[in-house]
Image (spheres, coloured by chain):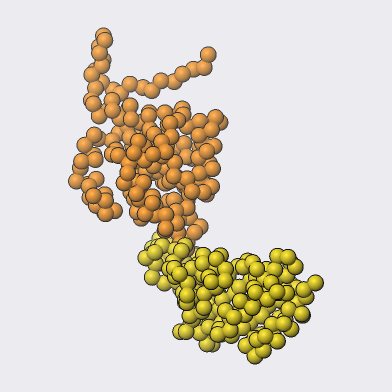
Chain colours: A yellow, B orange
Amino acid sequence: MLTNQYALNRIKEAFGDHITDASESYEMLTVSVNKDSYFDLIKFLKEDAELNCMFLTDLTGIHDPNRVNEELGVIVHLHNLTANFRIRVKTFASAEHHSIKSLTSLFKGANWMERETFDFFGIHFSGHPNMKRILNVDDMDYHPLLKQYPMEDQTREDKNNKYFGR
Amino acid sequence: MSEIKMTEAPPGIEGPGFVATSLDKVIGLARSNSIWPLPFATSCCGIEFMATMGANYDLARFGSERLSFSPRQADLLMVMGTIAKKMAPVLRQVYLQMAEPRWVIAVGACASSGGIFDTYSVLQGIDRVIPVDVYVPGCPPRPEQIIDGVMRIQDLVKNESLRRRNSAEYKQLLAGYGIQ
């Protein structure tokens, strides 16, 4: 059986200092990796005969302005379907330099999810074949889930801020 | 036998074998009792509309049993549900494909004002892209309210001047939406 501890040891053997953080929440192994080794780690997790994480469950972004120089993050969930082993991989980048290597060469499914992450967070995935908006209107000129932008539609004039908590 | 209620004849001069009235009123009467609606249903208001079309509420009583799923043959565009900003050009295109005279009813809070979805991705009322004749409040409105909205449309249709669509005001209204 593939345990979290064993998987973590294998990852640390292969990547050492590039793993910046490792933890376990709700029995799921979470590792943070620096931006430069992100692609290699995912490739390792997918292609290693034992870890064999062949399924990309989810890929999404996060924006936390309080983390100086690593405001933007990408979170990847992988699943080894035969051993029912799941792992979460995080990588962070600064708001200025947030080009991250695309996973589309490993997982076809990453295409849609990376476009979505780009659409909402502005994180650029280098090597993605079609890096443009997917869900929002094409002429939108910002990335709406970045914290500096309010959630509400800014064109309304009929709402009294006092009653709507703005 | 059920009692069949006929619509009243428009006021005019009546004599043996003839009725004289204005053309506006005859056409208004005919149009208002044979409105073909195009349901543009995107969410729960659409479900209420399905109930409205069903046997219990039966929109057919108002001459609107024939839904038109092509905008080209529809008289009334019924927008029911949240319209995302990405959907707005589609809705506008549907409206443009309708032939004059055309009417629009915004059913429910979302179509009327964006409703609870005060957010960057949702159109804050369809009147931002197309002109609206009647707004039906509710989240979602009950079928009775939708019927009330359709009856108000019927009133508009019945009393509309045949020249309205050629008037300067109407052209100005459309121009305000960038149409034509």
Farthest top residue in view: B16
Q: What percent of the width, then of the height, locates residue B28?
A: 30, 30
State whether residue B108 is above or below residue B161: below
Q: What percent of the width, then of the height, locates residue B25?
A: 27, 27
Residue A162 in view, yes or no: no
Q: Quadrant of the rendered structure where residue B84 is? A: bottom left
Location of the N terminus of chain A by quadrant is bottom right
Task: State the count of labels.
Answer: 0
Identify the residue at image location x=47%, y=77%: A126
State whether residue A34 is above or below residue B162: below
B68 or A131, nearer to the observer:
A131
Identify the residue at image location x=50%, y=40%: B49
Q: What percent of the width, then of the height, locates residue B107?
A: 45, 45
Residue A141 in view, yes or no: yes
B159 or A70, nearer to the observer:
A70
State whether residue A110 is above or below residue B168: below
Farthest front residue in view: A49
B74 or A11, nearer to the observer:
A11
Identify the residue at image location x=26%, y=9%: B16
Farthest right residue in view: A1
Identify the residue at image location x=33%, y=30%: B31
Q: What percent of the width, then of the height, locates residue B142?
A: 53, 41
B56 or B122, nearer to the observer:
B122
Q: Is residue B138 left or right of residue B33?
A: right
State whether residue B59 is above or below residue A2: above
Farthest bottom residue in view: A17
